[in-house]
Image (cartoon, grey):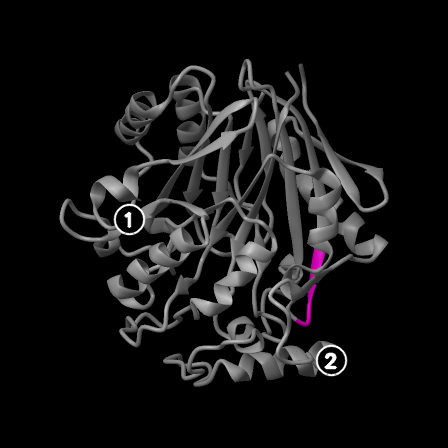
Amino acid sequence: MSAVRLFLCGDVMTGRGIDQVLPHPCDPMLHEGYVQSALDYVQLAEALNGPIARPVDPAYIWGAALDELHRSRPDARMVNLETSITRSEDYLDKGINYRMSPENAECLSAAAIDCCVLANNHVLDWGREGLLDTLATLQRLKIKAAGAGRDLAGAGAPAVLPITGKGRLLVFSFALASSGTPRRWAAKPDAAGVSFLADLSEASADRVCEHIVQARQPGDIVIVSLHWGPNWGYDIPDEQTRFAHAVIDRGGVSIIHGHSSHHAKAIEIYRSRLVLYGCGDFINDYEGIEGYENYRGDLALMYFADIDPASGVLTRVEIVPLQIRRFQLVLPSADDAEWVRQRLDRESRRFGTGVATTSPGRLALSWPG
Protein backbone atom coordinates (compact mmCIF):
# COMPACT_ATOMS: atom_id res chain seq x y z
CA MET A 1 0.00 0.00 0.00
CA SER A 2 1.38 3.42 -0.96
CA ALA A 3 2.04 6.14 1.61
CA VAL A 4 -0.63 8.57 2.72
CA ARG A 5 0.49 12.02 1.69
CA LEU A 6 -0.75 14.94 3.79
CA PHE A 7 -0.57 18.67 3.22
CA LEU A 8 -0.38 20.80 6.33
CA CYS A 9 0.29 24.47 6.93
CA GLY A 10 0.02 27.03 9.68
CA ASP A 11 -2.40 29.87 10.24
CA VAL A 12 -4.80 30.76 7.45
CA MET A 13 -6.22 34.19 8.28
CA THR A 14 -8.67 35.16 5.57
CA GLY A 15 -10.37 37.97 7.49
CA ARG A 16 -9.94 41.73 7.55
CA GLY A 17 -7.98 42.89 4.49
CA ILE A 18 -8.20 39.60 2.64
CA ASP A 19 -11.97 39.45 3.10
CA GLN A 20 -12.14 42.96 1.64
CA VAL A 21 -10.46 42.03 -1.66
CA LEU A 22 -12.60 38.92 -2.17
CA PRO A 23 -15.94 39.30 -4.02
CA HIS A 24 -18.33 39.53 -1.03
CA PRO A 25 -16.70 41.37 1.88
CA CYS A 26 -18.13 42.04 5.32
CA ASP A 27 -18.56 45.55 6.68
CA PRO A 28 -14.93 46.78 6.92
CA MET A 29 -15.41 48.47 10.30
CA LEU A 30 -12.91 47.23 12.90
CA HIS A 31 -12.61 47.67 16.65
CA GLU A 32 -8.82 47.92 16.90
CA GLY A 33 -6.53 50.51 18.37
CA TYR A 34 -4.29 50.31 15.28
CA VAL A 35 -6.81 50.99 12.49
CA GLN A 36 -10.58 51.29 12.29
CA SER A 37 -11.20 49.79 8.83
CA ALA A 38 -10.14 46.52 7.24
CA LEU A 39 -9.54 48.51 4.05
CA ASP A 40 -6.56 50.11 5.79
CA TYR A 41 -4.80 46.73 5.70
CA VAL A 42 -5.40 46.58 1.95
CA GLN A 43 -3.84 50.02 1.57
CA LEU A 44 -0.80 49.02 3.65
CA ALA A 45 -0.19 45.98 1.44
CA GLU A 46 -0.62 48.00 -1.75
CA ALA A 47 1.72 50.71 -0.52
CA LEU A 48 4.43 48.09 0.03
CA ASN A 49 3.99 45.74 -2.93
CA GLY A 50 1.70 47.37 -5.49
CA PRO A 51 -2.02 47.48 -6.34
CA ILE A 52 -4.40 44.55 -5.91
CA ALA A 53 -7.02 44.36 -8.67
CA ARG A 54 -10.28 44.00 -6.77
CA PRO A 55 -12.32 41.89 -6.43
CA VAL A 56 -9.98 38.94 -6.73
CA ASP A 57 -11.03 35.43 -7.69
CA PRO A 58 -11.59 33.06 -4.71
CA ALA A 59 -8.51 31.08 -5.83
CA TYR A 60 -6.31 34.19 -5.97
CA ILE A 61 -4.96 34.06 -2.42
CA TRP A 62 -3.47 30.57 -2.89
CA GLY A 63 -1.41 31.59 -5.92
CA ALA A 64 1.62 29.33 -6.41
CA ALA A 65 0.39 26.96 -3.69
CA LEU A 66 -2.20 25.60 -6.13
CA ASP A 67 0.53 24.47 -8.53
CA GLU A 68 2.36 22.75 -5.66
CA LEU A 69 -0.81 21.00 -4.52
CA HIS A 70 -1.43 19.80 -8.05
CA ARG A 71 2.14 18.53 -8.28
CA SER A 72 2.19 16.75 -4.93
CA ARG A 73 -1.39 15.42 -5.04
CA PRO A 74 -1.85 14.98 -1.28
CA ASP A 75 -4.51 12.57 -0.02
CA ALA A 76 -5.73 15.19 2.46
CA ARG A 77 -5.32 18.94 2.88
CA MET A 78 -5.45 20.52 6.33
CA VAL A 79 -5.16 24.13 7.54
CA ASN A 80 -5.53 26.02 10.81
CA LEU A 81 -8.39 28.40 9.96
CA GLU A 82 -7.86 31.38 12.25
CA THR A 83 -10.88 33.35 11.09
CA SER A 84 -14.58 33.33 11.93
CA ILE A 85 -16.83 32.85 8.89
CA THR A 86 -19.74 35.13 9.70
CA ARG A 87 -21.47 38.44 9.23
CA SER A 88 -22.24 38.57 12.94
CA GLU A 89 -21.74 41.98 14.58
CA ASP A 90 -21.33 40.43 18.04
CA TYR A 91 -17.63 41.21 18.23
CA LEU A 92 -15.65 40.50 21.37
CA ASP A 93 -13.60 43.36 22.78
CA LYS A 94 -10.21 41.65 22.47
CA GLY A 95 -8.22 44.02 20.27
CA ILE A 96 -8.14 42.05 17.02
CA ASN A 97 -11.14 40.36 15.40
CA TYR A 98 -10.92 38.26 12.25
CA ARG A 99 -13.93 37.42 10.11
CA MET A 100 -14.75 36.78 6.49
CA SER A 101 -18.19 36.51 4.93
CA PRO A 102 -19.77 33.07 4.40
CA GLU A 103 -19.87 33.87 0.68
CA ASN A 104 -16.10 34.44 0.60
CA ALA A 105 -15.48 31.06 2.22
CA GLU A 106 -15.52 29.67 -1.31
CA CYS A 107 -11.81 30.51 -1.21
CA LEU A 108 -11.33 27.39 0.95
CA SER A 109 -13.01 25.23 -1.67
CA ALA A 110 -10.81 26.81 -4.34
CA ALA A 111 -7.84 24.99 -2.75
CA ALA A 112 -9.88 21.83 -2.09
CA ILE A 113 -9.23 22.05 1.65
CA ASP A 114 -10.46 18.88 3.37
CA CYS A 115 -10.17 19.88 7.03
CA CYS A 116 -10.02 23.10 9.03
CA VAL A 117 -8.79 22.93 12.60
CA LEU A 118 -10.61 25.57 14.63
CA ALA A 119 -9.23 25.38 18.18
CA ASN A 120 -7.46 28.75 18.15
CA ASN A 121 -7.67 32.28 19.51
CA HIS A 122 -9.70 33.85 16.68
CA VAL A 123 -12.53 31.47 15.82
CA LEU A 124 -14.81 33.10 18.43
CA ASP A 125 -13.79 36.69 17.67
CA TRP A 126 -17.40 37.37 16.69
CA GLY A 127 -19.07 35.45 19.47
CA ARG A 128 -20.70 32.08 19.63
CA GLU A 129 -23.06 33.11 16.86
CA GLY A 130 -20.00 33.63 14.68
CA LEU A 131 -18.71 30.17 15.58
CA LEU A 132 -22.04 28.56 14.73
CA ASP A 133 -22.01 30.37 11.37
CA THR A 134 -18.47 29.07 10.79
CA LEU A 135 -19.47 25.48 11.49
CA ALA A 136 -22.55 25.76 9.27
CA THR A 137 -20.54 27.24 6.39
CA LEU A 138 -17.87 24.53 6.54
CA GLN A 139 -20.58 21.88 6.62
CA ARG A 140 -22.21 23.47 3.55
CA LEU A 141 -18.86 23.40 1.76
CA LYS A 142 -18.31 19.76 2.84
CA ILE A 143 -15.12 20.69 4.70
CA LYS A 144 -14.49 18.77 7.91
CA ALA A 145 -13.83 20.69 11.13
CA ALA A 146 -12.05 19.77 14.35
CA GLY A 147 -11.46 21.60 17.61
CA ALA A 148 -14.70 23.56 17.93
CA GLY A 149 -18.32 22.59 18.08
CA ARG A 150 -21.87 23.34 19.15
CA ASP A 151 -21.17 21.70 22.51
CA LEU A 152 -18.40 19.93 24.41
CA ALA A 153 -18.87 16.64 22.61
CA GLY A 154 -18.81 18.27 19.19
CA ALA A 155 -15.74 20.34 19.98
CA GLY A 156 -13.81 17.30 21.19
CA ALA A 157 -14.79 14.97 18.35
CA PRO A 158 -12.09 14.35 15.75
CA ALA A 159 -12.53 15.18 12.10
CA VAL A 160 -12.67 11.85 10.27
CA LEU A 161 -11.29 11.85 6.73
CA PRO A 162 -11.55 8.61 4.73
CA ILE A 163 -8.50 8.08 2.51
CA THR A 164 -9.54 5.92 -0.42
CA GLY A 165 -7.87 2.52 -0.19
CA LYS A 166 -5.68 3.62 2.74
CA GLY A 167 -7.92 3.81 5.80
CA ARG A 168 -8.90 6.90 7.76
CA LEU A 169 -7.26 10.06 9.03
CA LEU A 170 -8.36 11.30 12.46
CA VAL A 171 -7.66 14.95 13.31
CA PHE A 172 -7.89 16.15 16.92
CA SER A 173 -7.54 19.86 17.62
CA PHE A 174 -6.87 21.69 20.91
CA ALA A 175 -6.15 25.29 21.95
CA LEU A 176 -4.14 26.47 24.93
CA ALA A 177 -4.12 29.71 26.87
CA SER A 178 -0.46 30.25 25.89
CA SER A 179 -1.66 31.07 22.36
CA GLY A 180 -4.01 33.77 23.60
CA THR A 181 -7.13 31.60 23.57
CA PRO A 182 -9.39 32.72 26.43
CA ARG A 183 -10.35 29.99 28.87
CA ARG A 184 -13.96 31.18 28.71
CA TRP A 185 -14.05 30.02 25.08
CA ALA A 186 -13.93 26.38 26.16
CA ALA A 187 -16.93 24.42 24.92
CA LYS A 188 -19.40 23.24 27.57
CA PRO A 189 -21.93 20.39 27.59
CA ASP A 190 -24.62 22.89 26.59
CA ALA A 191 -22.61 25.70 24.95
CA ALA A 192 -20.58 26.10 21.77
CA GLY A 193 -16.85 26.68 22.03
CA VAL A 194 -13.40 25.29 21.40
CA SER A 195 -11.65 22.16 22.59
CA PHE A 196 -9.47 23.70 25.29
CA LEU A 197 -6.50 22.20 27.11
CA ALA A 198 -5.83 23.75 30.49
CA ASP A 199 -2.14 22.82 30.39
CA LEU A 200 0.44 20.41 28.95
CA SER A 201 0.72 18.25 32.06
CA GLU A 202 0.94 14.47 32.16
CA ALA A 203 -2.70 14.41 33.19
CA SER A 204 -3.67 16.41 30.10
CA ALA A 205 -1.63 14.07 27.90
CA ASP A 206 -3.43 11.11 29.48
CA ARG A 207 -6.82 12.67 28.73
CA VAL A 208 -5.88 13.35 25.12
CA CYS A 209 -4.58 9.80 24.68
CA GLU A 210 -7.73 8.34 26.23
CA HIS A 211 -9.78 10.42 23.82
CA ILE A 212 -7.73 9.09 20.90
CA VAL A 213 -8.01 5.47 21.99
CA GLN A 214 -11.79 5.75 22.25
CA ALA A 215 -12.11 7.13 18.72
CA ARG A 216 -9.51 5.29 16.68
CA GLN A 217 -9.96 2.08 14.74
CA PRO A 218 -7.25 -0.28 13.50
CA GLY A 219 -5.34 1.33 10.64
CA ASP A 220 -6.28 4.93 11.51
CA ILE A 221 -3.65 7.65 11.15
CA VAL A 222 -3.89 10.25 13.91
CA ILE A 223 -2.95 13.93 13.90
CA VAL A 224 -3.05 16.11 17.00
CA SER A 225 -3.23 19.82 16.12
CA LEU A 226 -2.24 22.28 18.85
CA HIS A 227 -2.56 26.05 18.97
CA TRP A 228 0.10 26.80 21.54
CA GLY A 229 2.72 29.36 22.47
CA PRO A 230 3.29 33.03 21.58
CA ASN A 231 3.42 34.66 18.16
CA TRP A 232 7.15 35.38 18.05
CA GLY A 233 10.34 33.66 19.15
CA TYR A 234 12.09 30.34 18.53
CA ASP A 235 12.01 28.98 22.07
CA ILE A 236 10.55 25.48 22.46
CA PRO A 237 9.42 24.98 26.08
CA ASP A 238 10.30 21.62 27.60
CA GLU A 239 6.63 21.08 28.42
CA GLN A 240 5.76 21.14 24.71
CA THR A 241 8.37 18.49 23.93
CA ARG A 242 7.30 16.29 26.86
CA PHE A 243 3.65 16.57 25.84
CA ALA A 244 4.38 15.78 22.18
CA HIS A 245 6.43 12.73 23.14
CA ALA A 246 3.76 11.53 25.57
CA VAL A 247 0.89 11.56 23.07
CA ILE A 248 3.10 9.90 20.46
CA ASP A 249 4.21 7.21 22.92
CA ARG A 250 0.80 6.54 24.44
CA GLY A 251 -1.60 7.65 21.73
CA GLY A 252 0.17 6.37 18.63
CA VAL A 253 -0.01 9.83 17.04
CA SER A 254 1.74 10.24 13.68
CA ILE A 255 1.90 14.05 13.51
CA ILE A 256 1.91 16.84 16.07
CA HIS A 257 0.70 19.88 14.11
CA GLY A 258 1.75 22.90 16.17
CA HIS A 259 0.88 26.48 15.28
CA SER A 260 0.37 30.00 16.68
CA SER A 261 3.83 31.42 15.91
CA HIS A 262 3.80 33.85 12.98
CA HIS A 263 7.00 32.26 11.66
CA ALA A 264 8.23 28.67 11.28
CA LYS A 265 9.89 27.02 14.26
CA ALA A 266 11.90 23.85 14.89
CA ILE A 267 10.92 20.44 13.54
CA GLU A 268 11.52 17.19 15.41
CA ILE A 269 11.26 13.59 14.26
CA TYR A 270 10.55 11.54 17.37
CA ARG A 271 10.31 7.75 17.00
CA SER A 272 9.70 8.33 13.27
CA ARG A 273 6.77 10.64 14.03
CA LEU A 274 6.61 14.29 12.94
CA VAL A 275 6.52 17.15 15.45
CA LEU A 276 5.98 20.59 13.94
CA TYR A 277 6.44 22.99 16.85
CA GLY A 278 5.28 26.00 14.87
CA CYS A 279 4.21 26.04 11.23
CA GLY A 280 4.14 29.81 10.86
CA ASP A 281 1.52 31.91 9.09
CA PHE A 282 0.40 30.74 5.68
CA ILE A 283 -2.08 33.43 4.60
CA ASN A 284 -2.44 36.80 6.33
CA ASP A 285 -2.92 40.53 5.75
CA TYR A 286 0.25 41.68 7.56
CA GLU A 287 2.05 43.28 4.61
CA GLY A 288 3.22 46.76 5.48
CA ILE A 289 2.87 46.32 9.25
CA GLU A 290 6.17 47.21 10.88
CA GLY A 291 7.90 45.20 13.58
CA TYR A 292 9.43 41.72 13.86
CA GLU A 293 10.76 41.84 10.28
CA ASN A 294 13.80 39.79 11.31
CA TYR A 295 11.53 36.74 11.73
CA ARG A 296 10.47 36.95 8.06
CA GLY A 297 6.80 36.26 8.69
CA ASP A 298 6.18 36.97 5.00
CA LEU A 299 7.73 33.59 4.16
CA ALA A 300 5.15 30.78 4.30
CA LEU A 301 5.74 27.03 4.24
CA MET A 302 3.86 24.10 2.73
CA TYR A 303 4.51 20.84 4.61
CA PHE A 304 3.99 17.57 2.72
CA ALA A 305 4.30 14.50 4.96
CA ASP A 306 4.23 10.89 3.76
CA ILE A 307 2.94 8.37 6.32
CA ASP A 308 3.11 4.58 6.07
CA PRO A 309 -0.55 3.56 6.59
CA ALA A 310 0.42 0.16 8.00
CA SER A 311 2.64 1.48 10.80
CA GLY A 312 1.76 5.17 11.06
CA VAL A 313 5.42 6.17 10.82
CA LEU A 314 6.84 9.00 8.79
CA THR A 315 8.66 8.08 5.59
CA ARG A 316 9.30 11.47 3.99
CA VAL A 317 8.79 15.21 4.51
CA GLU A 318 9.04 17.85 1.80
CA ILE A 319 8.76 21.57 2.53
CA VAL A 320 7.98 24.18 -0.10
CA PRO A 321 8.73 27.83 0.82
CA LEU A 322 6.42 30.52 -0.56
CA GLN A 323 6.07 34.24 0.04
CA ILE A 324 3.06 36.48 0.72
CA ARG A 325 2.81 39.34 -1.77
CA ARG A 326 -0.32 41.44 -2.36
CA PHE A 327 -2.32 38.91 -0.32
CA GLN A 328 -1.21 36.08 -2.62
CA LEU A 329 1.29 33.24 -2.24
CA VAL A 330 4.13 33.51 -4.74
CA LEU A 331 7.45 31.76 -5.28
CA PRO A 332 10.24 33.32 -3.22
CA SER A 333 13.66 34.26 -4.49
CA ALA A 334 16.45 31.70 -4.24
CA ASP A 335 18.01 33.81 -1.47
CA ASP A 336 14.80 33.83 0.55
CA ALA A 337 14.33 30.08 0.13
CA GLU A 338 17.89 29.57 1.36
CA TRP A 339 17.26 31.87 4.33
CA VAL A 340 14.31 29.66 5.34
CA ARG A 341 16.39 26.51 4.93
CA GLN A 342 19.22 27.83 7.06
CA ARG A 343 16.88 29.03 9.81
CA LEU A 344 14.89 25.78 9.92
CA ASP A 345 18.10 23.75 9.92
CA ARG A 346 19.57 25.87 12.73
CA GLU A 347 16.48 25.55 14.92
CA SER A 348 15.87 21.85 14.20
CA ARG A 349 19.44 20.66 14.82
CA ARG A 350 18.77 20.59 18.58
CA PHE A 351 16.45 17.65 17.81
CA GLY A 352 18.82 15.97 15.36
CA THR A 353 16.75 17.03 12.35
CA GLY A 354 18.46 18.41 9.25
CA VAL A 355 16.96 20.53 6.47
CA ALA A 356 18.51 20.39 3.00
CA THR A 357 17.68 21.70 -0.45
CA THR A 358 16.82 18.84 -2.79
CA SER A 359 15.91 20.91 -5.85
CA PRO A 360 15.26 24.60 -6.46
CA GLY A 361 12.46 25.72 -4.16
CA ARG A 362 12.10 22.40 -2.31
CA LEU A 363 13.45 21.31 1.05
CA ALA A 364 13.62 17.86 2.64
CA LEU A 365 14.15 16.65 6.20
CA SER A 366 16.75 14.16 7.37
CA TRP A 367 16.88 12.47 10.76
CA PRO A 368 18.81 9.68 12.51
CA GLY A 369 17.66 6.09 12.12
Q: Where is residue 41 in the image (x, y as percent from the top left)?
A: 55, 79
Closest to the observer: 268 or 4? 4
Residue 228 horizontal side relative to residue 70, left or right: left
Is residue 18 depicted above or below 156 in this figure? below
Which residues are the magenta region? 322-326
Q: Mark 1 points at which residue?
A: 149
Is 325 in the magenta? Answer: yes
Closest to the observer: 95 or 130? 130
Earlier in the chain: of badge 1 and badge 2, it is 2
Q: Is residue 258 visible?
A: yes
Residue 132 horizontal side relative to residue 49, left or right: left
Residue appearing at x 46%, y 22% in the figure: 220
Circle 1 crowding by C-alpha within 10 Å: few under 14, some 14–19, many from 20: many
Q: Mark 2 points at which residue?
A: 50
Displayed quadrant of residue 46: bottom right
Q: What element carries label 1?
A: strand
Q: Position of residue 95 (x, y in %)?
A: 36, 73
Q: What residue type is labelled 1?
A: Gly
Q: Which amino acid does label 2 sit on?
A: Gly
Q: Which SS does the magenta portion mostly show?
A: strand
Closest to the observer: 149 or 248? 149
Is residue 325 depicted above or below 89 in this figure? above
